[in-house]
Image (tube, rainbow, N blue to C red):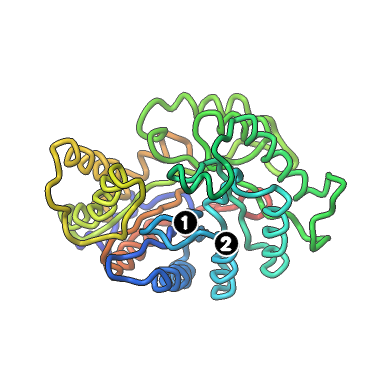
């Protein structure tokens, strides 16, 4: 069986699939190329039937071109017609809630019914970046306050009116771990969860559901999981596709910043660094279409997720495109994919 083009119906997923693109720069490539590639990938994602296409926020990272999600979202939304476009996410420590609300509402006015607003609370990756952003500390209570203010601005329940007026608020999602899950539960908001939470104790997800307070927009808890997903014709090739991000991750531990993606293994990796590479690859959902479908089905079953967002990237853009196409074929077209607020 061709692991890239065929998937047994028993392994087809029953939840929507979406993409998150971080505008990863390849070695020897200008950042503008990476940004234009993000827009091109969004156009293909729409053609392939993905549910959403989200972009990220990173500052002063040599290997990531995207520092302004609203600007990139505007470009993506203008180049597409149907797919939902969002941020994964905008980091609230770096922006006043009013500004975030204004940007989101302006996008929603230009592209009605297509904009998502995902927010998080990560600080800049290094001390100089945090200092440049003007935020060196950001406590859970700060995030709760800013998130509450943002929600109120979007719902027009604050004295200041967010312009343009009369625009339906885009749905708000929380990129959450730990205390962020508790904050989202208290505010009655959906969450996007990835990383260690999915591979360890799932009690934080149970706590989120148990503590969830129904809101006007979300009467029930709503969980989206994010995963690094790569599909190839053989398991060995899929593993090779996962290595460039693993090498970049290891380099970031030494340099403090993710470098551009490379197709060559760094020289002189220590035993500890090689172990970190293998750990990263192991956490990547990679393999043939059959293998990836099974792993994603297991993740959805374990977590009760309503959707999967894949944030994969690799050096070989053509292989990335083929992986996206294979992943799209795992999406069950006949499944009811309705959500609150039409999202």
Residue closest to the eye, 316 or 237 = 316
Disc 1 crowd, CA 10 A, few/some/many (<14, 14-19, 20+)? many
Give the vertical position of 157 relative to 47 (above or below): above
Viewer can see residue 51: no
Residue plotted at (42% across, 33% down): 197
| Residue 3: quadrant of the picture | bottom left
Q: Looking at the image, which residue sits at the far bottom?
A: 79
Q: Secondary structure at mark 1?
A: strand
Q: CA distance from mark 2 to mark 1?
A: 9 Å
* Residue 292 appears left or right of 152: left
Residue closest to the eye, 300 or 155 = 155
* Residue 152 appears left or right of 312: right
Disc 2 crowd, CA 10 A, few/some/many (<14, 14-19, 20+)? many
Q: Secondary structure at mark 2?
A: strand
| Residue 217: quadrant of the picture | top right
Viewer can see residue 224: yes
Residue plotted at (51% across, 26% down): 206
Q: Earlier in the sequence, mark 2 or mark 1?
A: 1
Q: How many marks?
A: 2
Residue plotted at (48% across, 40% down): 193
Residue 1 lies, in percent from the top left, at: 18, 60
Q: Where is mark 2, residue-wise?
A: 84
Residue 141 lies, in percent from the top left, at: 64, 29
Give the vertical position of 98 relative to 322 (above or below): above
Residue closest to the eye, 44 or 27 = 27
Quadrant placement of the C terminus: bottom right
Residue 258 lies, in percent from the top left, at: 34, 52
User: Given contact means CB atoms under 8 Å apart, are the residues at marks 2 and 1 in contact?
Assistant: yes
Residue plotted at (27% across, 48% down): 251
Residue 59 lies, in percent from the top left, at: 48, 54
Instruction: Give the numbered dot on residue 18.
Output: 1
């Amino acid at each position: 069986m061709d692991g890239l083009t065929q998937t047994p119906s028993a392994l087809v997923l029953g939840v929507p699939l979406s993409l998150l693109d971080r505008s990863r720069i390849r070695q020897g490539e200008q950042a503008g190329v990476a940004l234009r590639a993000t827009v091109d990938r969004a156009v293909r994602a729409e053609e392939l039937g993905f549910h959403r296409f989200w972009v990220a926020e990173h500052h002063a990272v040599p290997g990531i071109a995207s520092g302004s999600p609203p600007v990139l979202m505007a470009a993506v939304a203008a180049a597409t017609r149907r797919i939902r476009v969002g941020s994964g996410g905008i980091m609230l420590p770096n922006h006043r809630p009013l500004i975030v609300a204004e940007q989101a509402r302006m996008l929603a006015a230009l592209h009605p019914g297509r904009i998502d607003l995902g927010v998080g609370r990560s600080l800049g990756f290094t001390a100089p970046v945090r200092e440049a952003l003007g935020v060196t500390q950001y406590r859970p209570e700060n995030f709760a306050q800013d998130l509450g203010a943002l929600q109120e601005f979007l719902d027009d329940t604050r004295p200041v009116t967010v312009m343009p007026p009369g625009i339906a608020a885009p749905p708000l999602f929380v990129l959450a771990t730990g205390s962020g899950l508790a904050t989202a539960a208290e505010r009655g908001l959906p969450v996007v969860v990835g990383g260690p939470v999915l591979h360890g104790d799932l009690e934080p997800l149970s706590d989120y559901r148990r503590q969830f307070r129904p809101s006007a927009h979300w009467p029930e808890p709503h969980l989206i999981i994010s995963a690094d997903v790569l599909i190839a014709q053989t398991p060995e090739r899929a593993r090779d596709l996962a290595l460039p991000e693993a090498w970049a991750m290891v380099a970031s531990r030494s340099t403090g910043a993710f470098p551009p993606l490379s197709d060559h293994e760094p020289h002189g990796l220590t035993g500890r660094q090689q172990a970190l590479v293998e750990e990263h690859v192991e956490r990547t959902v990679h393999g043939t279409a059959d293998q990836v479908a099974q792993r994603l089905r297991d993740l959805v079953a374990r977590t009760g997720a309503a959707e999967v967002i894949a944030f994969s990237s690799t050096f070989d853009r053509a292989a990335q495109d083929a992986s996206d196409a294979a992943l799209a074929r795992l999406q069950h077209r006949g499944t009811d994919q309705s959500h609150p607020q039409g999202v």
